[in-house]
Image (spheres, helix red, strand yellow):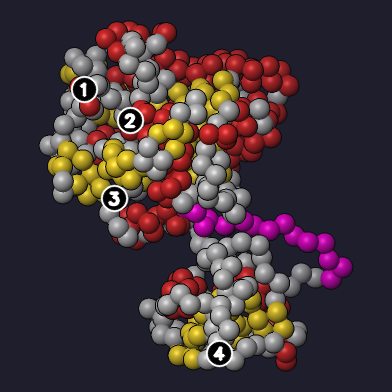
Amino acid sequence: MPKGASPRGRGGRSRIGVGGWASIGLTGLLVLGTLGGYKIYRDTLGNIKGVQVDKNLSENRPVNQTGALNVLLVGSDTREGDNLKYGQKMANAGKRTDTIILMHISPNRDKATLVSFPRDSMVDMPACKSENGTPVAARRDMINSAYNVGGITCTIDTIEALTDIRIDHFVEVDFTGFKNIVDALNGIKICLKQPVDSKKAKLTLPAGWHNLNGEQALGYVRLRDYGDNSDIQRIKRQQVFLTKVVQKATSSALLTDPAKLLDFINQAAKSVRMDEELAKDTQTLMDIASSAKALTASGVKFITVPWGPDPADKNRVVWRQPQASELFESIKNDTEVIPAASPSSGPAKPAVKHEQVRVQVFNGTDKPGLATEVAGKLAAQGFVVTHVGDARPAAGNLPTTTVRHGKKDAEQGPAYADALAARLSGDKLAPTVGKIKPSTTTKYTPATPITETPAGPVVQLVIGDDWKGVRVPTKIPDSLKDSVVDTKTDPCQ
């Protein structure tokens, strides 16, 4: 929300901050994963509430072709049960969320990027089905309305439609779960730039460092009357909070203490709701646990979807383009997988680097400008693109994409073609012997001039109707680097 915007949701409902829910969802995932390796803890998995969601999701969903893991983290502010004391007047109001965060764990499970979606974002929500199968009409509204009216199924459909990123799993937590998990971690240490005296959040603390217990932490993440009262500032402050949670949840002090670990696992298992596939999939939980071991503080980054004020309503925001789309594309195409070494009777050949590969990009379809667009993406990854052109036959589009090398390059050509094929989305293409003659060709001038032209063979990328795109590592666009929150961010917010 822009500065000066209303700090309340519709109907005056108080709101829990983004980082609070995400920290518990992420922490629960990381540590619940450790259960897979300890037989003594396996029974605790039965305390996780699984929800069957696939049957009510859209049939037209994105495909995850990279091996990454995308988990949607949401926070429920239901006032039912033990949560009633946080708003008795809302006892029959159902549940809402002011937190929607996409946690993207890299294919290597050694990096995590968490993307926060401001709850005041005005978006086009697709038609969907609620958790009980009730149809919900398409609408333009704040992004959190997807959860408010359609639950987790409509939220997943909305995020997938807006980002074109496949959501593999979801995790949801409520007020009481938040408190219990923080207490099981023996508190979270935070730093306040200014003193806090908030009756609404029931939190009074001087400036400086504090180790917050569960009740205090709940007040902190619900804090509204602090700073400039904006959602954006609160998101950043609570993303810093999350870095502290990750550090503590993955510390050896917790993971090597069986009693503390069991207490934490019990609280986490009772406090989260997730899709049945994840709740029952011990191996995936183990994979996430492995992420916890590989993830260092420097491997976790947080960012908010690029935004700007909504011209139609100063209390709402819209996503800034093309920055938002660039961020989503980077996450969708993250394929930084280290391949396993293949058995060989002889010494391994050195890998061909992108900078050694000269590429010609030819468009075999009727989509204008595609060759130049693809050339730019390949050049950005270090490939030496020499020419672009058209290769569409008079009879119509080429049906398939090919990576080609010359007949005279039988020795080196396949390795150079493989280096290019590895960066293309979809199933890896086998090199095709023999180059084509394009109908038009133009010398390509990259944004960054090439100082030295490599001497290796030239390969061709001929784009067909089945083209799926260029794979790129998850990289925060340069225009958004100032918005990243990580361990280098000032801890006092």
Residue at (22%, 32%) from the top-left corner?
193
Q: Earlier in the sequence, mark 3 or mark 1?
A: 1
Q: Quadrant of the N terminus?
A: top left
Name the residue tied to disc 4. Answer: 438
Question: Who is closer to the viewer here, 456 or 103?
Answer: 103
Secondary structure of residue under mark 3: strand
Asked if marks 4 and 3 touch (Cβ < 8 Å), the reply is no
Q: Is residue 258 visible?
A: no
> Between residues 264 and 167, which one lies in front from this camera angle?
167
Helix, strand or loop under label 1: helix
- The three-letter code of the residue at mark 4 reads Pro
Q: Which residue is mark 2?
A: 98
N-terminal of the two: label 2 or label 1? 1
The residue at 21%/22% (across/down) is 11
* Left or right of residue 316, residue 358 in this image: right
Q: Label 3 is placed on what type of residue? A: Trp
Residue behind mark 3: 319
- Can you give x and y, in whole percent of width and height, for residue 442 in the image? 45, 90
Residue drawn where x is 57% and y is 35% of the image? 54
Residue indicated by mark 1:
11
What residue is at 58 percent from the left and 28 percent from the top? 52
Q: Are marks 2 and 1 in contact (CB under 8 Å)?
A: no
Q: Give percent across and percent down for residue 46.
A: 64, 17
User: Is residue 235 shown left or right of residue 355?
Assistant: left
What is the CA distance from the residue labelled 2 to the residue labelled 1? 14 Å
Give the mark nearer the N terminus: 4 vs 3. 3
Q: CA distance from mark 4 to mark 1?
A: 62 Å
Circle 3 residues within 10 Å: few <14, some 14–19, many ≥20? some
Q: Secondary structure at mark 2?
A: loop
Note whether 44 is above or below 310 in the view shown: above
* Mark closer to the chain start, 2 or 4: 2
